[in-house]
Amino acid sequence: MNSQYSIVIQWSMEDNKYIVSLPEFGPYAHTHGDTYASALKNAEEVLELLIEDYQAQEKPLPQPITISSRA
């Protein structure tokens, strides 16, 4: 998947798994995984579904969060 959207992966001691947030898509865009790799794979799948859903509903996609370079 080639996307400019953020994927935030954090370990949860409470859940004993990796929790993933997709911040551009709001506070409810989450998934998880037992390993970092599975969390990333799940995040990519959810992100792809979100993009497809936005496009099917003809909703504008959120602006990606970017880091501006400082020279």
Image: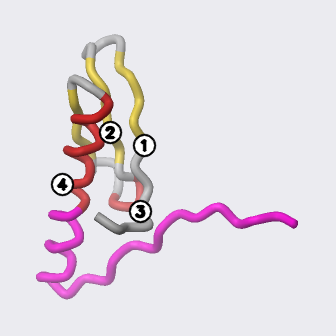
Q: Earlier in the sequence, mark 2 or mark 4?
A: 2
Q: Position of residue 66 (x, y in %)?
A: 58, 64
The vertical placement of 6 against 10, above or below, is: below
Q: Which residue appears at 23% of the width and 45% of the height? A: 41
Q: Which residue appears at 47% of the width and 68% of the height? A: 64
User: Within 10 Å of the Cα at label 2, are there few (<14), some (14-19), or many (20+) other Cα atoms?
Assistant: many
The residue carrying mark 4 is: 45
21 with respect to 39 (left or right):
right
The residue carrying mark 3 is: 5
Find the distance from the CA under tag 4 to the CA under tag 1: 14 Å
Residue nearer the viewer, 61 or 5: 5
Find the distance from the CA under tag 4 to the CA under tag 3: 13 Å
> What residue type is disc 3 on?
Tyr
The vertical placement of 18 against 46, above or below, is: above
**In this view, which residue lies farthest toward the right?**
71
The residue carrying mark 2 is: 20
> What residue type is disc 4 on?
Glu
Q: Which residue appears at 38% of the width and 22% of the height? A: 11
Q: Earlier in the sequence, mark 2 or mark 3?
A: 3
The residue carrying mark 1 is: 8
User: Within 10 Å of the Cα at label 4, are there few (<14), some (14-19), or many (20+) other Cα atoms?
Assistant: few
Find the distance from the CA under tag 1 to the CA under tag 2: 5 Å
> What residue type is disc 1 on?
Val
Give the quadrant of the N terminus.
bottom left
Q: Nearer the viewer, mark 4 or mark 1?
A: 4
Badge 4 element: helix
Q: Earlier in the sequence, mark 4 or mark 1?
A: 1
Q: Nearer the viewer, mark 2 or mark 4?
A: 4
| Span shown in magenta | 48-71
Badge 3 element: loop
* Residue 38 sits in quarter: top left
Find the distance from the CA under tag 3 to the CA under tag 1: 10 Å
